[in-house]
Amino acid sequence: MKALEPGVEVDGFLVGQMMHKGGMALIYETRYADGRDAPFPMVMKVPRMTAGDGAETIVSFEVEHQMMQALDGPHVPYLVAAGDLSVLPYLVMEYVPGRTLDHWLDQTLQGTPVPALELARLGAAVANAAHDMHQQNAVHLDLKPANVIIRDAAAGTPDDAPLHAVLLDFGLSFHAHYPDLLAEELREAVGSPAYMSPEQVVGVRGDPRSDVFAIGVMLYELATGELPFGAPSSKGGLRQRLWMDPRPPRALRPDLPEWLQEVILRCLEPVAAERYPSAAHLAFDLTQPEQVQVTERGRRLKGTGFRTHFKRWLRAAGAQYQPSPLPTRVIDEVPILMVAVPHHDVTDATLYSLREAVRRSLGIRPGARLAVITVVAPGAASSTDASRSETAQHRQMLTMLKTWAQGLPQERHQISYHVMEDSDPSEAILRYARANHVSMIVMGAATHGLQMQRFVATVPIKVAMDAPCTVILVKQSTPFEQLGGAA
């Protein structure tokens, strides 16, 4: 099929100039032919259908049409219309203003490496977008710099505000609620070789941790200008990914902080279970680097030795396709929990009850992450008394939180501690929960210093009413009271 000419009308859309010519599709500017205004700029995507193009081009188009009908939210372009496959297949969708990650990659390749904190902001934006997709029981499976747009920020947005990523090109994606057309056509590896996860190599297409792996590849490439595994095209070259790991990025870029290498190499673990359990966990570390637990993985400057690679090779020798559980099930098994610990006007019974409730919640969720927070009022610190300075107060609160958490199963769970300053504790708790994809909030049912009034909701009630997740309100109790009652 020939390229469309500017000015051609297709089903009520006026085709404009070609914007992009890709390997599997052509992108055109477009608008309504009758002159009415669209709510946003639009583009038309038409699959390539020349004699030299394979059947996978049409299958990928069908998959993308299917996915864009199923997905919603701010991290995917809005689908306006689709053309009949038997006449002229096309997708008209929202044009997203912004820059793909190729912009930052070019910056690195030209000798100006992206600063570590900016890398973290970019990675967190992509991880948040991927997690939103995973929560809809879908996996992208073709994340790469060209398929991620960082949306232009609105005027007046602070420079350090979180970035917003929009994912593109769902032609290789998987949705648990729809037939997997690509798997029906081909059980072998499907994807872009440089960014493909080890499990994709053996045909597994439903694991959300495959997208975590691809984000790790992009972060490695943005940090160093090199691909961690090259871009092999043979089956044998791809299977090496099941046991090989890349050269540590700090060996290529010494100024990279250890915490960022820790994050990148954890994403790139050959075994999915050893990576971040969800994109939400990855975003958590990228937005709060001071909480990253640096291990040998973050400090190493040499690759893994022969003995480790050989053991992995033996384990991978029999690796083959296995069905994946629902993406939502994978991420629900390792949630991010949050407990709000009061720091004044609080009884020992409340603190004890909170800790026991958290212990029970962690006990039935191996691998879950726990964020321990407290909220202090602005102006509580002193500018003249060093012992009551803002820094001293922050340290005191962190010590209090860590003391409270003693006895929790810390060896099996990542636990982080956060002191927030806000005049509205409920809003601070809600804001943190939304920003970090918290699945459950645990807090005391008492008012913690706020007077109960008939028409004024307490902090726990406000949180319970507006939280984006489950809220457990814990009633005060201690074993000493039970012992006393028994006597």
Image: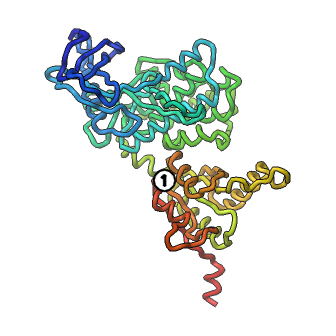
- Side (left or right) of 229 relative to 169: right
Residue at (32% x, 24% y) in the render: 42
- Residue 26: x %, y % from top left: 30, 16
Can the viewer see residue 353 in this picture? Answer: yes
- Residue 301: x %, y % from top left: 69, 26
Q: Amino acid at mark 1?
A: Ser
Q: Quadrant of the C terminus?
A: bottom right
- Side (left or right) of 161 relative to 21: right
Hey, which residue is sitting farthest left in the picture?
86
- Side (left or right) of 75 relative to 450: left
Hey, which residue is sitting farthest front in the picture?
36
Tell me the crowding category of disc 1: few under 14, some 14 to 19, or many 20 or more residues within 10 angstroms, Cα based.
Answer: some
- Side (left or right) of 284 relative to 41: right
Hey, which residue is sitting farthest bottom in the picture?
487
Q: Which residue is mark 1?
A: 439
Residue at (63% x, 53% y) in the render: 422
Q: Quadrant of the N terminus?
A: top left
Name the image colouring. rainbow
Residue at (46% x, 55% y) in the render: 469
- Residue 10: x %, y % from top left: 19, 19
